[in-house]
Image: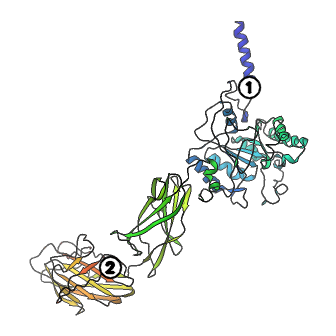
Amino acid sequence: MKTRWLSGILLLALFTLAPMKANGRASAHALLEPQTPFDINIPILAYHKIDQTAPSEWYVTADQFARQMDVLQAYGYQTISLDDYMDYTQGIGQPPEKPIILTFDDGFQGLFDYAAPILKERNMSAAFFIITGKVAEAGQPRQNNQDWQPAEPEAYHLIWPEVVSLYEDGFPIESHTVTHPALTGLSSEQQQVQLNQSRQDIQTHLPQNPARFFAYPYGNGAADPTVRANVQAAGYSAALGFGPSDGLANPSTSDLWALPRRAIKRDVTLNLNPADPYWFFMHRVDPNFPIPLIYNVGDFRVKDYANRERTAFYSGEPITVSLRVSNWGSPVNVVGSLELRQNGQVVYDSHAQTPSQDVNLTPLPYGSGAGDLKYSLTAPPSAAISEQVSYTLRIKDHTYLLGYFTSDLLPAFTVQPYPIEATAAPSPLALYPNQEKDLTFSVSYTGADAEQMYLTVSFSNAITVTAASPGGVWTSYPVGSLVKANGCSSPCLVTSHPMYEAGEPLFGGGVKNYTLRLRLLPGVSSGLWLRYRLTMRVPGNLTGDYYLRDPIPGTTGITDQQLFPAFSLPINGPANLFLPLVQR
């Protein structure tokens, strides 16, 4: 009985003496025996100023910071505290698969206005290292940085009510000295004042916050034995360095009095510069992060719906843009995004389409021409006879947050409006047995002078043509007189029905009317139809649907081998006993 009583007293004493963690929480591992430290590399990122703009290298804009946090979460990183890190040095707890520590030095107002809300929105943590002598009391003027950062743009520090609010929101407040001096330039006694007073200032305003961690101003002092001894004597549990070549912290190997931190400054970007990956954000987070190296775009082609490669197209014409990219880096999953610009305006963006028309390469392999990208779209509108369309290709990561490559603005193709308009009148056109009516086509060409124009009309055997105007333009051809040269899609212009053609080898341009007087034969009540095709040869020899004409009548072995770009112009008409003008 006595033994049980003594054991209870000892346990109570141990719990009473258990150290407290930040925010007044007792360590859940205080009574556990130390274990083998975890061997895991943990990035510790060091930020300074967060604001709407970035007037110097020490700033990161709020938008830039928010996108960086989105990238971390997209790639599975979880923020941990410095207290968690200290547990891992004892083999206590279980690190997440991808732990990361966020820190902010100096204690500027932007941490309260921008950084903390962005972090809270994403349920992320961070430690704020403040210069306590620059934090004004409630009711006092807010202090700026000009006495200790005269070369920097004016920036204001936090005030104590904001610091208290940050702490109450779960952000640990840690020490960064009283006035931010380089500690190696001070006497040992002056160092002790900076180290002890700053910690005491924090504990005075935040009694539950032990201020266990210290960040060396300018990253200066970790290698100095006197500074290190004074930091330890002031009661800190660990101290953080700061250097351009700092690596990752490891609970089993890193020096607790010089924990490495990786600086995140204005020039750290989410868009990779293959020639200088040092400033790529994910390279800062993980030096072994797989990065593709894309240097060129090749085999750029634009084809029409018949898979013919061309350099000029008409507005609204279906086209396919294809190109290849080469990757001399790591195979990774990427997204290819194509943007077209005309007269400085974006006329097509594959990423902005609904649904997105970006091309996924999973992964983009290593090698020359490894990535094959194709986009189906329509040629953009054009107000002029010929306008240049240029393209930009972007290669992004699978989250569309990181940029691996952006091409220059390069020529893609030219585009011009359809120069032909055609209408049929009257509409609807009703024909009764033995009745005659005029069918008029109005052809309008607004481009440069056309070299040739042919309007070909075919119709069912129940219809005859009794007159055509203007005289000398319309010609009646034998059945099946036109053959489509580059393949035939239904319906073809090969027919066993009557066919008339208005042909003007030197059309010129403007508006011209062509009329056929049609007569419906008696005894027919169904199967009435009419098709037409307008073809023109225009300057520039632009390609399209082409037709080869039959041998010229009265000649031997002579054929008119001119090619005619074809424009399909729909005419809709009535059904039943009326004459349906079938779209071709």
The image's mark for residue 369 is none
- Secondary structure under tag 2 reads loop
Q: From the image, which quarter does the N terminus lie in?
A: top right
Left or right of 458: which side holds 326?
Answer: right
State the image quarter where residue 321 is shown: bottom left
Q: Position of residue 172 (x, y in %)?
A: 72, 41
Left or right of 209: which side holds 36?
Answer: left
Q: Which residue is mark 1?
A: 18
Q: Position of residue 216 (x, y in %)?
A: 79, 45
Residue at the bottom extreme, as displayed: 471
Q: Residue at x 73, y 49 (%)?
A: 243
Q: Position of residue 229 (x, y in %)?
A: 83, 37
Label 2 CA crowd tier, 10 Å (few <14, some 14–19, many 20+): some
Residue at the top extreme, as displayed: 1
Instruction: Decide: is 183 above or below 61.
Output: above
Q: Which residue is mark 2?
A: 565
Q: Position of residue 84 (x, y in %)?
A: 67, 35
Q: Is residue 200 visible?
A: no
State the image quarter where residue 434 is shown: bottom left
Residue toward you, 56 or 137: 56
